[in-house]
Amino acid sequence: MSQDKLSPIESIKQKSDGLRGTLSQSLQDNYTGNVRPDDEALIKFHGMYVQDDRDRRQERAEKKLDKLYSFMIRLRIPGGVITAKQWQAIHEISEQYGTGVLKITTRQTIQLHGLLKHQLSDTIKGFITAKLDAIAACGDVNRNVICSSHPQVSPIFEQIHNYADRISTMLLPKTQSYYEIWIDDQKVYDRSLESDPLYEDKYLPRKFKIAIAIPPTNDVDVFANDIGLIAIIENEQLVGFNIAVGGGLSTTHGNEKTYSRLATVIGFSDNEQDTMKLIYEVLTIQRDYGNRSDRKQARLKYTIDQMGVDNFVAELEKRAGVRLQAPRAYTFTERNDRKGWQQAEDESWYYTLFVENGVVQPNQKEFLSHLAKLRLSDFRFTCNQNLILGEIAAEDKWMVEKLIKQFTIETTVSGLRESSMACVAMPTCPLALAEAQRYLPVLVSKVEPLLVKHDLTNEQISIRMTGCPNGCGRSYLAEIGFVGTGPEQYNLMLGGDRYGTRLNKVYKAKLSEQEILEQLDILFDRYKKEALDSETFGDFSHRKFFT
């Protein structure tokens, strides 16, 4: 791909000495809570983002103080499963460092916010002791590989789920800088052992995301990913994967060259070795052809659209030495998590804890700490920002139930609230134009009476909010989506389907809360009166307004 001028971050990556940069020196700088400018880009590859408390910017500026800098750390947890012992380690680390709040992300992992620079090394050492890391959880590399969360969907769930860890391991950067900077201090690794045929010294043009869906559930929003694997199961046997490429939701307000795109299913692979080769070579194509001049055009979706799907597939088959087969049939019939108690094929029990927008509440955190100490379950994060307590033996179920009651964990919430999702947004995300995580629960409380008014209380309408157009809360795949355009102002998006296979579109732009409620009141009234039999709100909106 011809590119006249590389974006500044490309030079930073290539000159970084395996993502080391001057991070070690930055950690010693005591005149600021931030790291050096180039290191702000590099620290992402170590699973961290520099943030500041935007609620306090003005106050600190008036006092001529530096921004209140802190760091967010995101763990790499392929498939989202950790042990009780690891949860307890996360709990204790969060109590010692940062804000104390644990946040479950839309990509099946945990984030800690509010960590100060001098706490980073001790925090990471604590994670390493618990056999957890943040390597490549952010940055221009493959990020956390996600997989459907619910063992009940298939008797061969674990076999499929194991692919997440194997893919993640295959696509990890070879540099040992993470250990050198955060763990070993002065130890210098042999650079010859860090030769990286996948990422070379330039890594990818932008972040890269992979998801594995196990029909009939699409809890991972498989088509929102650069690579989506759809497990094809016949006679309770995994026969292979449909492979989809080029998904991505991020856009930029006012930039018509940016757009959301669903991944295109390009074929089927029935051979494990071939599947891994195909995944690997998709990344090499993106490495070689992706846009390194304009980061807003640098995701795989733009590479594919510029090359053309047929040319992309031909290049992929050539590099992998594999011929894709025709896609196999599959059906998605659910996307939400299966709430409450569920039993798997092996008769073990699973309990899904509803965690609104991923923010673990104090009573939930205390409950989970007590449970972790008993070692009765594992802990499984979902892409809907909830938590599944898994592998509970039948004879231990009563102890979990006792703790659930003790800490008032069981709550009744509306279908709308169960189906809600929000990105972090204010006050820590530097890109946020409006609130999301802090505001969506408030807005849902104001929308719920409208559902009662129109006799729609039991409808599980998906509702999602992002504070900017980058789409971290996957609002573009909701039946009702909100995308922040400015303070207390959102685009209202309609027409997405319930199972994550159709994008929504802007219905009304730049609405205030009052205007949102007025519009939803009208829409719910029309839906109740004009919907076809069994027609979901998303399908109704799509039919009425966009076809």
Image (spheres, rainbow, N blue to C red):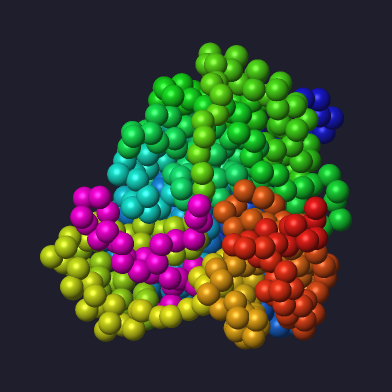
Magenta segment range? 333-362
Q: How many labels does the image show?
A: 0
Q: Residue at x 28, y 82 (%)?
A: 405
Q: Does the magenta stretch include residue 347?
A: yes
Residue 432 lies in the magenta-colored region: no
Residue lying at the far front in this picture: please name it: 533
Of 41 and 442, which appears nearest the observer?
442
Q: Is 364 displayed left or right of 524 in the figure?
A: left
Relative to 304, say whether 59 is above or below. Answer: below
Q: Classify 292 as above or below 110.
A: above
Between 70 and 410, the residue placed more toward the observer is 410
Which residue does the image show at 44% across and 44% down from the upper left?
214
Residue 342 appears in view = yes
Residue 260, given in percent of the width and then of the height, sits at: 72, 48
Q: Which residue is drawn at 46% across and 45% down?
A: 215
Residue 379: x %, y % from top left:
32, 59
Question: Which quadrant: the N terminus?
Answer: top right
Residue 94 drawn above or below residue 197: below
Residue depicted at x 74% and y 37%: 302
From the viewer's side, name the closer residue of 292 and 271. Answer: 271
